[in-house]
């Protein structure tokens, strides 16, 4: 059975999973004051060739512990889609964090 969800639906589902399954609440997200959520989103969204490049002029900007980095698993189309779902959900989390900050 194929998964017919749109990209927006997949991202919303991933964000719900991050909150409910991982405990990444707004209080947790508000602790990332150096825009780590946006940086992680950019890393997940980047094509494999960008973050596999290891030259002196490139420093991998991944903002969290290596154990949380799932980018090395992007070997199939399904895995690449999964990483983009995570990227979209992290962007949503960063937008929400900034909106909360704006109202305080």
Image (spheres, rainbow, N blue to C red):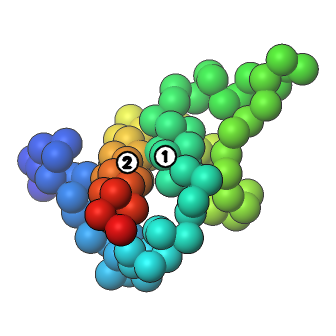
Looking at the image, residue 23 lies above or below residue 59: below
Looking at the rendering, in which quadrant would you find the C terminus? bottom left
Q: Position of residue 76 (x, y in %)?
A: 45, 38
Distance, label 1 to label 2, CA atoms, is: 6 Å
* Residue 98 occupies quadrant: bottom left
Q: Are marks 1 and 2 in contact (CB under 8 Å)?
A: yes
Residue occupying image coordinates x 15% and y 53%: 9
Q: Nearer the viewer, residue 41 or 83?
A: 41
Crowd around label 2: few <14 · some 14–19 · many ≥20 (10 Å): many
Q: Residue 4 at x, y = what percent?
A: 9, 47
Residue identifier under label 2: 91
Which residue is nearer to you in this view: 3 or 46? 46
> Percent position (x, y) of residue 45?
46, 35
Vertical order, 90 against 54 (above or below): below
Q: Which residue is mark 1?
A: 38
Residue at 27% of width from left, 70% of height from top? 16
Q: Determine the residue positioned at 44% across, 79% down.
A: 27
SS label for mark 2: helix
Looking at the rendered structure, the secondary structure element under dot 1 is helix
């Amino acid at each position: 059975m194929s998964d017919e969800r749109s990209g927006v639906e997949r991202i919303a589902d991933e964000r719900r999973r991050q909150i409910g399954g991982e405990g990444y609440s707004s209080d947790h997200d508000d602790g990332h004051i150096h825009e780590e959520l946006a940086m992680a989103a950019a890393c997940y969204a980047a094509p494999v060739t960008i973050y596999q490049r290891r030259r002196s002029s490139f420093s991998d900007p991944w903002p969290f512990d290596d154990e949380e980095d799932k980018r090395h698993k992007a070997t199939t189309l399904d895995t690449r889609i999964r990483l983009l779902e995570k990227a979209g959900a992290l962007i949503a989390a960063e937008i929400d964090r900034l909106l909360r900050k704006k109202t305080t």
